[in-house]
Structures are given as C-alpha cells and as structure tokens.
Amino acid sequence: MHHQSTLCARPVLSLRHGESTYNAEGRFIGWADPPLTERGEEEARRAAHALREHGFADAIDDIFVSYLRRSIKSGWIIADELGCSHVPVNSDWRLNEQMYGMLQGRLKRDVAHEHGVDLTQKWRRSYDIAPPAVAGARGYFPAGDAKYAELTDDDAPESWCGSAQTESLKDTQARAWRLWKERIAPRARAGRTSLVVGHGNVIRAMLKRLDGIGNERLREVCIPRAVPLVYELDAEMRPVRSAYAFGALSGYFLANPKQIAAALKIESTEAQLGLRAGADPGETSSSSGSFAAS
C-alpha cells in the first residue's frame, strides 16, 4: 500500500484528530474546544509514523486544519514528526466538527438515558436531522468567540435551518464541500498532496459527497481517530476505488485490519453510549424512549 504517483491527480490524505479530553470522558464535542490528551498526542505521533512508513513523509505539500485546537495540535505534531513544519498550514472554520447544539459538552451516556439510544443515534449518525438548538442563543456562530468574530449568518451553510448553534450533517457537508471545491481539489489537480486533519463527522460528510454514499449506508461509515485515510483521484477529481478500500469508502486506511478493528471498536455504539454489548434494553431504558441499539 505504498504511495505510487500513477494517477492524474495527487492523492488527498485525511485524518481525524487524536483523542481529546472530551473524547476520553465520552462527551459530545461539536465546536467545543478541549485539548488533546497525552494519549491523543501519542495517537498523532503514530499517525505520522504510518504516513512515513507508507512513503508520504516527503509528499505532503499542504496541511488543512479546523479552528479547533484538537485538530490544530494534531496537525502540528504530525508536521513535526515528519520534519515538514515548513509546509503551509491552512486553518479553515469549514473543517470544524458538526455542531451539536444543546448536546455539546454533555455525556453521551446521559443523553442516551434521557432520550433513548434510537434518538441519540439519529442525532449522532443521521444525515438530515439536527440536534436540538442551544436554548436562548441566536445565530449560527458562537457569540463572543473571537475565532468567529468576522463571520456572520451570511457565511453559514445555505442549507442551515436557522436553529441556534446546531446543524445536521447535511449542513456540515455543505460547508465542507465548499472547502473541498475551493481549496483542496484545486491543489490536488495542480499536483499538490494535501493532508486534511479534521473531525469524525466533517470527514464523513465530505466523503459522503465524494463517494456518493447514500444516507442509510452513511450510518455505517465511521472514521477512527488518528488513522490516515488515502484517496486517489482521477483527472476529474473522482475517487479511484482502491484494492484496499474499506466498506463504502473508496480510499484505504494506513493500518492493518486488526488495527482498524481495534480503532473502530472504540467508536461502537456500546462504547460511545456507555452500554454493555448485548445488554437487555429493559435494564437500561428510561421512560423517554427505547434503549435498543440503533
């Protein structure tokens, strides 16, 4: 699976950030800005080692990160480990994670107990259902945060429903795809290799559009932390399905099957919502909904 320059466009590498403190605590993160844990920093270093092992150490021409420090710090660590700190780092808010509205900062297991697993999973995995809005808030961008001071609702995704500080994955995709078309794809077409250090749902959203993944199948698509994902593109910027493609994705992870399975286990419904695999729904359900896994 070593890199080969055999196609018309350069490959695009994507990577979800390393573990943050909110990941470790099992919280909905969204646009909250927790730091990486020590484990998260080590995950970023391992990602850099995987990139080097597969021949990408000297191939990266641009790095894209979000406005959130778990993405930024992961990008810094990788650049440092690969000896490419001179490579331009492009920070863009459109690479931020999906907004989670009133769920942001809450423990996922608490939300599941309160609202049921089915509804919680719809908020986590569906395409066009947005989590509940932030009560008392107005507008798309968080008020009082200097990172977004120059942005207004006119910059929000065109599909945004108008509910305060929340969005569906469809909205996330709209802004991420603008970034792809305006900044990432032109670089690939010009022969530059980009490393996109983003977040789980924003990467899912971008790849949904790139691969043409249906809404229902998208629920099965999961992006593990800090495992590089390689997409080869043709001259029309269409993905070329790899012989090592994973599930609905055309690209391939720079990891062996056991490593991928271990990384995905962390993202399972049981792990994320604090459930025991195979638990009796009646033991863990609340009056607000069924606790059967979705």
Image (cartoon, rainbow, N blue to C red):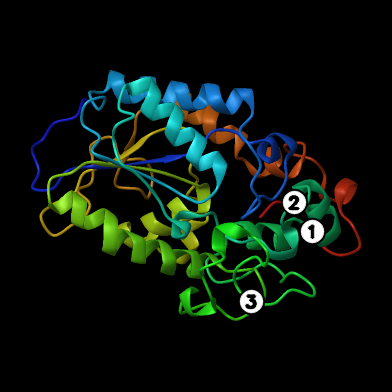
Q: Amino acid at mark 3?
A: Gly
Residue at 26 percent across and 24 percent down: it is 57
Q: Which residue is mark 2?
A: 105
Q: Amino acid at mark 1?
A: Gly
In the rendered view, does 106 fall on the left or right side of 225?
right
Q: Nearer the viewer, residue 201 or 289?
A: 201
Residue 59 location, x and y as percent?
A: 21, 31
Q: Which mark is residue 139?
A: 3
Position in image of residue 233 (x %, y %): 18, 49
Between the C-alphas of marks 1 and 2, the distance is 18 Å
Task: In this rendered view, identify the residue nearer to me: 220 or 151.
Answer: 151
Name which residue lies at 80% across and 59% down. 290
Q: Secondary structure at mark 1?
A: loop
Q: Is residue 33 above or below residue 76?
A: below
The image quadrant where one finds the C terminus is bottom right
Sequence-wise, which precedes: disc 3 or disc 2?
2
Q: Assign the N terminus to one quadrant of the image.
A: top left
Q: Are marks 1 and 3 in contact (CB under 8 Å)?
A: no
- Which one is closest to the eye, mark 1 or mark 2? 2
Position of 168 relative to 200 (above/below): below
Residue under pointer 1: 116
Q: Nearer the viewer, mark 1 or mark 3?
A: 3
Would you place residue 1 above or below residue 204 in this image?
Answer: above
Residue 236, how many percent across, how many down? 13, 60
- Label 1 or label 3, whichever comes before in sequence order: 1
